[in-house]
Amino acid sequence: MPVEIERKFLLANDDWRASADAGVAIRQGYLAGSEKSSVRVRIAGEQANLNIKSATLGVTRQEYEYPIPLADAHAMLDGLADGPLIEKTRYHVQHEGHTWEIDVFAGDNQDLVVAEIELAREDEPFARPPWLGEEVSGDPRYYNVCLVKHPYKDW
């Protein structure tokens, strides 16, 4: 069973930008959601995926992801997804053997910036970059599926 182990953090400052890649624009929306799972369509650059993820709170969740045609993804986001869509730019930063994903949100979630790290196991050690702030892995407000219904601008 595919599993994602991911921890989320706020950022203490913008120093991460000095080591970041060029970033990729992401547009995503949710087609369905329940107490057990969510179904998401994501376009990242010129790649599109359908993603099914368990709705459990915490750092470990089941996750299934499949590539889909880009035109289909645009049609699904424009005609089937709950709004507003999630818009963000994702940057990658290497730090002491791990890749950090930094999401800079736009639209209704403007000014929200979240760092994520995927781990092989929940207790895997990792070096905390100096720009890393408070951990928010256990706070559902920071999950993308929650940001659709409760955008950052309304907090």
Image (spheres, rainbow, N blue to C red):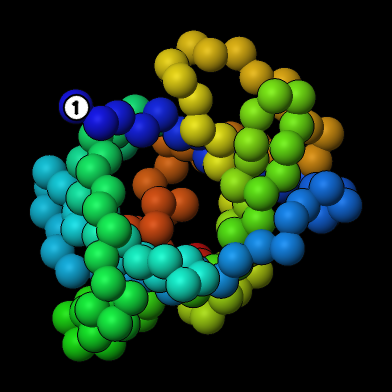
Residue 147 vertical placement versus 3 (above, below): below
Pick the residue in front: 11 or 28: 28
Q: Locate residue 138 relative to residue 57 in the image: left or right.
A: right
Residue 67 in the image, given as x and y percentages of width and height: 29, 58
Pick the residue in front: 21 or 36: 21
- Residue drawn 35% across and 66% down? 48
Residue 45 vertical placement versus 58 (above, below): below
Residue 14 in the image, given as x and y percentages of width and height: 82, 54
- Residue drawn 25% across and 65% down? 68
Q: Locate residue 18 relative to residue 68 in the image: left or right.
A: right
Q: Locate residue 74 relative to residue 1 in the image: left or right.
A: right
Give the mark count: 1
- Residue drawn 26% across and 40% down? 63
Q: Is residue 151 visible?
A: no
The local secondary structure at tag 1 comes to loop
Q: Amino acid at mark 1?
A: Met
- Residue 17, picture quadrant: bottom right
Residue 36 vertical placement versus 98 (above, below): below
Which image quarter is the N terminus in? top left
- Residue 27, picture quadrant: bottom left
Mark 1 Cα-neighbour bin, 10 Å: few <14, some 14–19, many ≥20: few
Q: Is residue 4 visible?
A: yes
Residue 112 in the image, given as x and y percentages of width and height: 60, 63
Residue 43 in the image, given as x and y percentages of width and height: 40, 70
- Residue drawn 20% across and 58% down? 39
Q: Which residue is mark 1?
A: 1
Q: Locate residue 103 relative to residue 123 in the image: left or right.
A: right
